[in-house]
Each structure stands twice: as C-alpha cells, then as structure tokens.
Amino acid sequence: MKPTTSVKPIGSWLNRTDRALTRAMDELLAASGLTRLAWQVLNVVRDAPGVDGATDADVLTLLAANADAPTLTATVETALADGWAARPAPARLALTADGRFRLDAAAERVAAFRTRAASGISPEEYRTAVGVLQRMTRNLEGAPVAGRGRG
C-alpha cells in the first residue's frame, strides 16, 4: 500500500492563521492600549474620505467580516472612551490629535510585525495567496446553497 499524505482543508489553515494573527497583534498592540480589532476600527476612521470622518455604518460595513456588530460597536465605544476618537457629529467618528499620534506610533510596530509575519514569503507568493483567497471568496459569496435556490 502507498503511504498517503493528508493536507488539512484550507478552512483549518485560515482559522489557525487568523487566530495566530489576532493573538500576535493583540500582544504587540497591548502596550499601546489597542487590540487588533481596535487597530482596524481606527484605520477605518482615519482612512474615511472627506472631512466629516467615518460613520458608524462605515465601521460596521467595512469590518463586518472581522467581528459582529455588537463587538464592533463596543470597540468604537472603547476608542471614544480612551480618547483615540471623538464624535464631531452624531453617528460620525474622527481620530483625535492624540489618537492620530498614537496610531502613527503603533504603525511602526505593525510594519515590523507584518515583515515578521511574511518572513520567507516572496511578494509574488503573497500576491498569489491573496488572489486565491479573493477568488475563493467570490466563488462562495452569493452562491446558492445546494438544494435551495437564490429565492
């Protein structure tokens, strides 16, 4: 009999990688008073187009794949309470001057983290991996469930 090699399903590696990224980033950002999710929320707020800042809906929509709405809302409230963000208008979010300064300081550590995480992975391999995951996601999003129509 031939020996068989078993490859874990991609979902197993995706889950394990996400947990490893979250754990490592949470440890990295703890000194700044942040978590990976808070970092993501603050980046959405910082990167919002226009002068009015991001909306709560922007955060919920752009980070829906990262956490559920109650968790994202709690993360926004923590950013507000900790002084990273403020509400320039109802349902709007903007970084405070202190929040922008602290986010920029944390960015240096995040850049080093990304370099460590991608160690031994060529830029071409990284692009290929991301491209494959994007195509797999597009294949599955909106696809009808077996036995049911799109109804």
Image (spheres, rainbow, N blue to C red):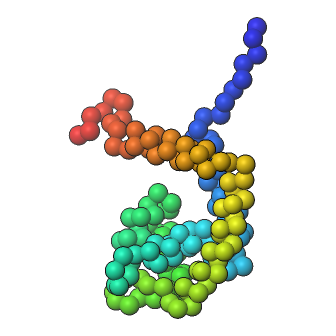
**Residue 15, position as x, y percentages in the image:** 61, 48
Q: Is residue 61 above or below residue 85?
A: above
Q: Nearer the viewer, residue 118 or 6?
A: 118
**Residue 64, position as x, y percentages in the image:** 44, 61
Q: Is residue 8 above or below residue 32?
A: above
Q: Nearer the viewer, residue 1 or 121?
A: 121
Relative placement, left or right, of 135 versus 25 is left
Relative placement, left or right, of 5 versus 79 is right
Please tell me which residue is depicted at 48% across the width and 70% down the height of the picture: 72
**Residue 92, position as x, y percentages in the image:** 37, 83
Please tell me which residue is depicted at 41% across the width and 88% down the height of the picture: 87
Relative placement, left or right, of 125 versus 147 is right
Q: Which residue in the rendered view is the most extreme toward the left? A: 151
Please tell me which residue is depicted at 56% across the width and 73% down the height of the picture: 38
Q: Is residue 85 above or below residue 16?
A: below
Q: Is residue 46 visible?
A: yes
Q: Is residue 64 above or below residue 123?
A: below
